[in-house]
Image (cartoon, rainbow, N blue to C red):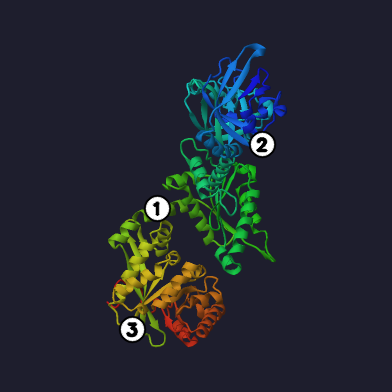
Amino acid sequence: MLSIDHRGLIVDVNDRFLDLSGHALNDIHGSPYTAVIAMRVLRYIALDLGLDVDDPAHGEPQPIPLITKAGDILWLYGTLTRGGTGEDATIRLVAHDFDMLGQRLITESGLIEAIDQQFLVAAFDMNGTLTRANPRFQKAFGFTGADVGMIDHGALVDADYAATREYTAFWNALRSGTRHCVQAMRYGRNGRQVWVDGAYHPIMDSRGLPVEVVFLARDLTLQKRTEAHASAQLRKSATIDALTGLANRATFLRSVQSAFNPVGGSVTGASLIMLIDIDGFSSINAAYGHEAGDAILWVVGTRLRDVLRGRDIVARINGDLFAAFVETPADERGGLGGFVERVQQAIAMPIAVGDLQITVTASAGLICDQGWRMAREAGADDIMVCAQAALAAAKVEGKASSRIYDTALADATRRSAVIERDLERALESGEICLHYQPVVALGGGAVVGYEALARWHHPALGDVAPPEFIDVAERNGMIHALGRRLLETAARFAATLAPDLWVAVNVSPIQLQRPKFASDALALIEGLGLSPDRIDIEITESASLDMSSAVQDNIRTMRAGGLKISLDDFGTGFSSLSQLLKLRADRIKIDRSFVMDCRDSQEKLGIIRSILGLSSAMGMKVVAEGIETPEISALLHELGCDYGQGYLFGRATLSPGT
């Protein structure tokens, strides 16, 4: 038994209490009751000594945490009663048996401590005033012990929410004893944001009436900040090019399409789209490596950003292709020509890559002035198609060139749109077919094989040159279906020829980048019962520059499977000896530009002799294209060229030999 006066001081204890606690009467008499009753625990079990209430529970069992002389907690199971009034009032604690409930509370006291250390814990009276808060709660919200009793719960929530009926209903539910779970933002000192995930627990007295609300929650603030940062990074990665930090293709296209919109768009005659492509960038990658290439792309992107103004948009579209969208009137830029020149000059400044100084140039395609109107009239769903047409025309003119989208290009864009629209139909209907041009042995003139050349006679456009529809097929992804159909047609034709004749088939660089190209081609050829060495896969010299792992794997698979490989248009690109060794071609084809009029050009003859010498040293046969006269045929034979192809020996026909 323990008695406490109205001041909360111990006035009497019995011998049994002293035996259980280990205290001596003289040590605790006149001491505050908290010397023997653990208030730090009472807050979790809703024990009320009744010092500040009018009608405490009488005779109802309560778990009582007794502090022993050794400092341990001993749980008793007893009752609290009040007697007397005024200064004569006392609270008497009468302990009963130390039963299983006491034992369970001893076991759970460690859990209580863990909760106190790991969770935000606070208590509010039924008016919403903060009455207790553990250290974690105070730290999270920026409060101190002095704030306890001074903070209203309404200050912890959004001010607008605190004024709503919903917030009133929230407190009414707590006052009726309803537990409330929440995951929401709360606010501490100076508007500090704290994300919490927890619950409000009404604590009931022995009569079942709520006397306070305990809030127990996890602090999710760090987690939410991390998630917000990750989300921001994800949104950024969806709009920003990772290498250069510029806008990416999707962001640029959204900006252009918005401005280009006939309704509400901001495009004027002075607005400008500029597509910028680094000249010969694949050769730079081949010569210096992809790390150097990436460094150059980063520098070019930085220079473009510097030469443009903040309100203009500059983006990396893909690879070495950049774009700028400028809404600034031309007269503010010193004229269109001056603007383009400044951009190209900025790019052409030497770039330091390690110990190297690398200089690059760039070509540009532009849409401005009347180009906007013509682009709409061309029916381009994507304005970028017109800009790409201007860029392609600029690159034909040579390095560091620029071309404005004009009437001629608008006509070409219309034609390209028709080609793209009808390409699939033409492929399925057989409108695109193969003609075969003979390849002969120089000196004797015997036919050794044929080159398969694609032809398309369009019902409205007339003859469509292979570069036109091949370029469209590469852009829209139909090149794989088209290439497979043409390869199958050529293989079927080869099966009708004498077993010592071969057929050469041109393959797009895009096809070679497809991982299963070689295995699919071999399966197709062998499925027709044809020996793979009857098919010669022609690869352009520009394609040989892209010796990516996929391309190299395809070349190895083709050679291992028995297919022959020719390097087409040799001399027009930038092949190195190391690339020729990697390619290990069976044949080299000298481009017609070196063959025609070679008798009158010592420079062309010198190049031809070099190619023939190189091929002989590497064990490769040589085919000369574009032979049109007996004199050139004889000269090439004398120089050691193996085979010839050209109008002298026959034009490409649908059914050769008929």
Q: From what the image shows, is residue 107 above or below residue 585? A: above
Q: Is residue 490 visible?
A: no
Q: Residue 76 carries which label?
A: none
Which callout, 3 or 1, points to the residue nearer the camera? 3
Residue at the spot 66% in from the left edge and 36% down from the top edge = 71
Separation of disc 3 and disc 1 at Cα?
42 Å
Q: Quadrant of the N terminus?
A: top right
Disc 3 crowd rating (10 Å Cα; few below 14, some 14-19, many 20+) is few
User: Which is nearer the N-term, disc 3 or disc 1?
Assistant: 1
Task: Identify the residue position indicated by label 3 in the image.
Answer: 500
Q: Position of residue 430 (x, y in %)?
A: 29, 63
Disc 2 target residue: 71
- CA gap between label 3 and label 2 equals 104 Å
* Numbered mark located on residue 417 in the image: 1
Quadrant of the rendered structure where residue 53 is? Answer: top right
Q: Percent from the top left, x then y, of residue 613?
A: 53, 84
Q: Quadrant of the C terminus?
A: bottom left
* Identity of the residue drawn at 57% across and 65% down: 285
Q: In this view, does 383 lie above or below 579?
A: above
The residue type indicated by label 2 comes to: Gly
Relative side of 547 to 491, left or right: right
Q: Is mark 1 on a helix, strand or loop?
A: helix
CB under 8 Å between discs 3 and 1: no
**Residue 161 spot, x, y in % from top left:** 53, 24
Q: Neighbour class for label 2 at 10 Å: few (<14), some, many (≥20)?
A: few
Measured in 3D between alpha carbons, the distance from the residue under mark 2 to the one under mark 1, in whole angstroms, is 90 Å
